Amino acid sequence: RVYLVESGGGSVQAGGSLRLSCAASDNTYSGGSMAWFRQAPGKEREAVAAIYIALGITYYADSVKGRFAISQDNAKNTVYLQMNNLKPEDTAMYYCAANEALAFSAGAKVAASDFRRWGQGTQVTVFS
């Protein structure tokens, strides 16, 4: 069974940066897509960023465009989320997700239901 392991969460002051990592246990997802979602207390899980690994197509939520960047390291089976200029409203549990069969086009949105495998999450707290 392939598993996903997130790391890199923590507490940071507003305006600061964090980089999240999601390592897959093998290269199962190299032909599919991986993504980052987040869920704050009392709110629904929302897509933050996603990448269709084979073509490098990305998706970003409007709330993070220009501040967050998703990238991949195929040799390490790892996807990163670089988060800059963090805001208190970015505070949430961040989850990595993957689907080896998912492809999406530029401009398309992704949803939690598109993904089959989930990590356990890493907490990001941004204080003002």
Image: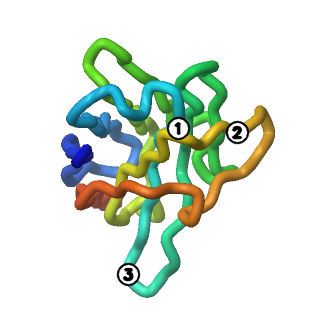
Q: Is residue 34 above or below residue 14?
A: above
Give the SS element for disc 1.
strand
Residue 84 image-quadrant placement? top left
Q: How is the image coloured?
A: rainbow
* Residue 11 image-quadrant placement: bottom left
What is the C-alpha distance between the residues marked 2 and 1?
8 Å
Q: CA distance from mark 3 to mark 1?
A: 26 Å
Q: Crowding at label 2, few (<14), some or many (≥20) Cα neighbours within 10 Å?
A: some
Callout 2 touching callout 1 (CB < 8 Å): yes
Circle number at residue 33: 1
Q: Is residue 82 left or right of residue 106?
A: left
- Image disc number at residue 6: none
Q: Which sits in the foreground, 38 or 76? A: 76
Question: What kind of residue is marked 1?
Answer: Ser
Tag 3's secondary structure?
loop
Rendering coords of residue 118 (x, y %): 34, 57
- For disc 2, the marked residue is 104
Instruction: Name which residue type carries label 3.
Output: Pro
Is residue 56 left or right of 96 when viewed as pictured? right
Q: Are marks 2 and 3 in contact (CB under 8 Å)?
A: no
Tell me the amino acid under the disc marked 2: Phe
Q: Nearer the viewer, residue 65 or 87?
A: 65
73 or 19: nearer the eye?
73
Drawn side of residue 22 relative to residue 46, left or right: left
Q: Residue at position x 59%, y 31% from top?
A: 52
Q: Nearer the viewer, mark 3 or mark 1?
A: 1
What residue did someone put label 3 on?
41
Where's residue 17, x and y in %?
Answer: 34, 37
Residue sitting nearer the eye, 99 or 85? 99
Badge 2 marks a residue whose secondary structure is: loop
